[in-house]
DNA sequence: GGCGGATGTAGACACCGTCTACCGCCTTCG
DNA sequence: CGAAGGCGGTAGACGGTGTCTACATCCGCC
């Protein structure tokens, strides 16, 4: 769509990623999909890692966008919704989710990418902080609590990705996880 | 060590994996490390995936072995110890841990491997069941609870692997996670 | 003694990431 | 107007990879 060849390549790579998975996102296939020669992408990206990092950045941006308008009135409900949205994103975009955390394909020091992950982490941390301000686990260290909860939902997505979790039970399993951290209202 | 060339190749691959990471575990490098020609491994394994699956199987076997003799008198303490052992294994063998869950490098339908993962899952499930028999979360569905707790510790390991968790905080983060699932004794 | 399977070798093929040399087009400026 | 230069793209090469095939050993067994 865009005239910018960088954006065209990122778009081709994203489509290829969604259609055929991480394996297919090779420089030469991206180039073919974009209708250019196999060396062309290197005119715009220093290497494969840089291109894939740019693709992963869009994934983090999309993930963050999902955390912008969450349903729920209270901070506790919004945090719950964020956890569900995280897993939902992984289920809907498995290849993108895999790419986002494959440090052999992506360079976390790429500025754009590190901004993307930072934004997601910050957003999630803020949701946790607000929930704590509302009385939930107010005693716990915010950063540690954020990391722990993030890991819990991330692990669900990751286990599902590698086939260790049956897809039809993932919703129920997520419920169990959320109950452990945010037990259903009892006073709070 | 063993005379069996299969075992020799698995040993070479395992050493290479520990020394230089997942990237280095290529058929040709394994062959070179084992002192044979590049085509030799294919005499004993149908392909790279099969060899790496065999390597990953030893990883699951080691992981299961760690769950055999856990410290702790009660079922609750033993479950806690198992969770800690899981993360500890990942921290001590990052490359092996990564390989074990890389479905592009490993074939979960490989009988030996599927037996390995099954054994670990079963072992973990039994620890959960015993803890439930002891009164802990006796109301919850055992399978779902097992998956949820597994995902929580797995996510910690995975996030640490991809650099999203500072290594010096992982112990504290694990404590938070375990507190969420197994709050420190209060009557129980 | 000869035969067959297990083990290993060597070369080929297609694909990959990356590098380099070349080339056209467009802008910009002298 | 015309030359310069940069941007985008091409084509070929190189070393690496997994896999396949043809060939060479060697060792036990009938």
Image: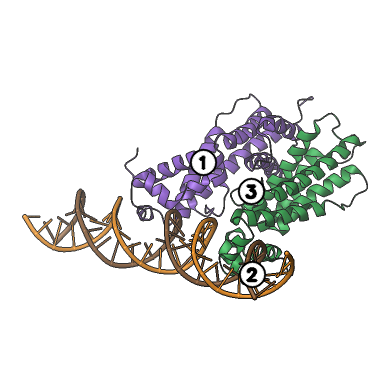
Chain colours: A purple, B green, C brown, D orange
Q: Could you say which is closer to the camera, residue B181 or residue B63?
A: B63
Callout 1: 10 Å neighbours few (<14), some, many (20+)?
many
Q: Secondary structure at mark 2?
A: helix
Q: Could you say which is closer to the camera, residue B94 or residue B10?
A: B10
Disc 1 versus disc 3: nearer the observer: 3
Res. A101 visible in picture: yes
Q: Secondary structure at mark 1?
A: helix
B46 left or right of B175 in image: left
Quarter of the picture holding the N terminus of chain B: bottom right
Query: Which chain hosts label 3?
Result: B
Q: Position of residue B47 (x, y in %)?
A: 59, 56
Residues at badges 1 and 3 in contact (C-beta under 8 Å)? Answer: no
Separation of residues labelled 1 and 3 (CA atoms): 27 Å
Residues at badges 2 and 3 in contact (C-beta under 8 Å)? Answer: no
Callout 3: 10 Å neighbours few (<14), some, many (20+)?
many
Write down the quadrant of residue B36 in the picture. Answer: bottom right
Q: Position of residue A131 (x, y in %)?
A: 68, 33
Per the image, the residue denoted by label 1 is A59
Q: Position of residue B93 (x, y in %)?
A: 70, 58
Separation of residues labelled 2 and 3 (CA atoms): 23 Å
Write down the quadrant of residue C22 in the picture. Answer: bottom left
Residues at badges 2 and 1 in contact (C-beta under 8 Å)? Answer: no
A46 left or right of B26 in image: left
Q: Which mark is residue B2?
A: none
Q: Secondary structure at mark 3?
A: loop
Query: Which chain hosts label 1?
Result: A
Per the image, the residue denoted by label 2 is B34
Query: Which chain hosts label 2?
Result: B
Quarter of the picture holding the C terminus of chain B: top right
Q: Residue at x 90, y 35 (%)?
A: B133
Per the image, the residue denoted by label 3 is B107
Q: Using the image, determine if residue A130 lies above or below residue B74.
A: above
């Amino acid at each position: 769509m865009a005239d910018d060849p960088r954006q065209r390549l990122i778009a081709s790579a994203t489509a290829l990623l969604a259609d055929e998975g991480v394996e297919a996102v090779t420089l030469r296939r991206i180039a073919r999909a974009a209708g250019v020669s196999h060396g062309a992408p290197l005119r715009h990206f220093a290497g494969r890692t840089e291109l894939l990092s740019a693709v992963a950045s869009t994934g983090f941006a999309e993930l963050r966008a999902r955390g912008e308008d969450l349903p729920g009135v209270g901070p506790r409900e919004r945090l719950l919704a964020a956890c569900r949205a995280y897993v939902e994103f992984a289920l809907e975009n498995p290849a993108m989710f895999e790419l986002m955390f494959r440090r052999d394909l992506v360079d976390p020091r790429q500025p754009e990418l590190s901004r993307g992950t930072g934004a997601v982490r910050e957003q999630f941390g803020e949701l946790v902080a607000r929930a704590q301000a509302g009385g939930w686990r107010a005693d716990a260290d915010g950063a540690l609590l954020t990391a722990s909860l993030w890991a819990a939902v991330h692990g669900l997505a990751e286990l599902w990705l590698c086939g260790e979790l049956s897809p039809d039970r993932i919703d129920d399993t997520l419920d169990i996880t959320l109950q452990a951290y945010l037990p259903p209202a009892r006073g709070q």
